[in-house]
Image (spheres, helix red, strand yellow):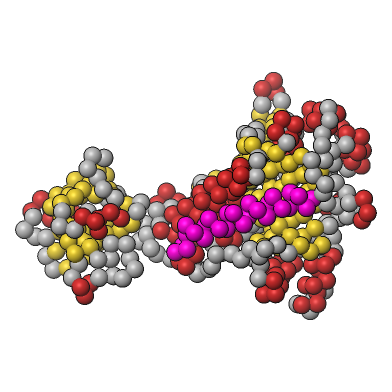
Amino acid sequence: MKDRIYIKDLKGNVGKEVVIAGWVDVRRDQGKMVFFDMRDVTGKVQAIAVPNRKEVMEIAGKMRPEWVLKITGIVNKRPEKNIKAGVVNGNVELEVTNIEVLSQATELPFALDAELNFDTYLDYLPLTLRTERARDIFTMQATILDAYRKSLQTQNFSEFEAPAIVGGDAEGGAAAFKVDYYYDQTAYLATSPQFYKQIMVGPFERAFTVAKIFRAEKSATTRHLSEATCLDFEMGFIENELEPMKVLENAIRDTVKIVGELHGDMFARFNTTVPEVPTEIPIFTLAEAQALIAKEFKRTIEDSNDMSPEDERQICEYAKKNLKSDFVFITRFPTKKRAFYTYEEPSETPYSRGFDLLFRGLEINSGAQRIHNYEDLVRRIIERGMNPEKFSYYLQTFKYGMPPHGGSSTGLERFTARMLELPNVKEATAFPRDMNRIDIRLSE
Ligand code: ATP
Ligand code: MG
């Protein structure tokens, strides 16, 4: 828009007539004057319509929150007693000389700053995404994605695009959504880019992808979505799982450093702090972690084969308090609890070279060294009761020579949610899909 300046730049234009554009945020009438806040992507400013400007008053008199306006006005310093310290434009206001209405809004169902029940927030996302809180969350998410990507690029990974439509279910467990495909065939939405990133070790040795994954599990929790975004990498020529763990740790450290530099104010607004990443993220085997939990929290462990959500919370609480770390690695899960391609630790059968990374009480990443030997992989597929012929396409990678390799997958929504300590991963998803909702509620 010609001549438009951003609201954040008003303070450099005191005494001048300028043009801004944005949404009416709140409106306050005082006597004959109309005071209202204008909001654009950079901030808010108080605007004032005075009675001697007839045309201005005519519009100001009838406009409502969320009307979209183009405003011409004179930037004035606010009287000393009205200055709002620490607020963008807390010391300037705009005396309106002209208003052009770009779009009207009907009456809002609620004030934008109202405390909403979470389902109502989701029902009205086209409106509620306009709050500062929502913009903060997705600004944070964009920064995380960018920082993570840059870190992997710096660590010599090549990015590729994984398919979302696949012929079979990679994890052989996670429920997949079916798709009607050509020639009466059934295809699936990918539950993971796993096979494709392993295949990409062939051309690139180190490959990564930012992929959509789709999971049809009928679970309604605060950490599961039907559609999620994952940051997946895979690397060749490793000795064991410690190498992908180190790459992941570097990506986490780089990401935390950048979000800390860029979004210090956001952490304050969400009542949390920049996460602590010590020189080495603590690593516990599953057995060590559960023994610690049993001792520290004086309770019995129900399932010694896997971490329960409570185990995840408590080991993180322990690490935060005693090791000054918001992140914890858990290793040596039983092989049978992990995906079929997971490499077993030969000296510790039946335990695997798989790992999980927990962040502030929640699993945000799973990874492992993978089986690279063709015969071993075929044997494992058979052991799991699956048919190797169904995997023939993927198995070519191993038939034609594959180095020892491993990698991991981080859920972007879970990473974002824990970064800002959001109670529900759905709040860290702009348009969440779950059992009960695709934009609108399915049950009604
Ligand atoms: P969980 O056991 O918590 O259900 P998972 O072990 O099945 O997760 P993985 O297959 O290990 O998940 O996927 C790697 C990462 O992708 C997870 O650590 C998580 O961050 C993310 N992720 C997986 N499934 C979902 C989902 N349904 N919703 C949101 N994020 C997910
Ligand atoms: Mg996992």
Instruction: Give the residue at x 68% y 38%.
Output: 207
- Where is 189 relative to 414, above or below? above
- Where is 174 relative to 293, above or below? above
Depth check, front residue: 290 or 200? 200
Depth check, front residue: 308 or 143? 143
Depth check, front residue: 181 or 138? 138
Residue 140 in picture, x, y percent from top left: 50, 54
Main SS, magenta region, reads: helix
- Where is 48 relative to 394, above or below? below
In the image, 8: left or right of 62? right
* Extent of the magenta region: 241-266
In the image, 17: left or right of 252? left
Residue 367 in picture, x, y percent from top left: 75, 49
Residue closest to the far left? 52
Q: Quadrant of the N terminus?
A: top left
Instruction: Give the residue at x 84% y 30%.
Output: 401
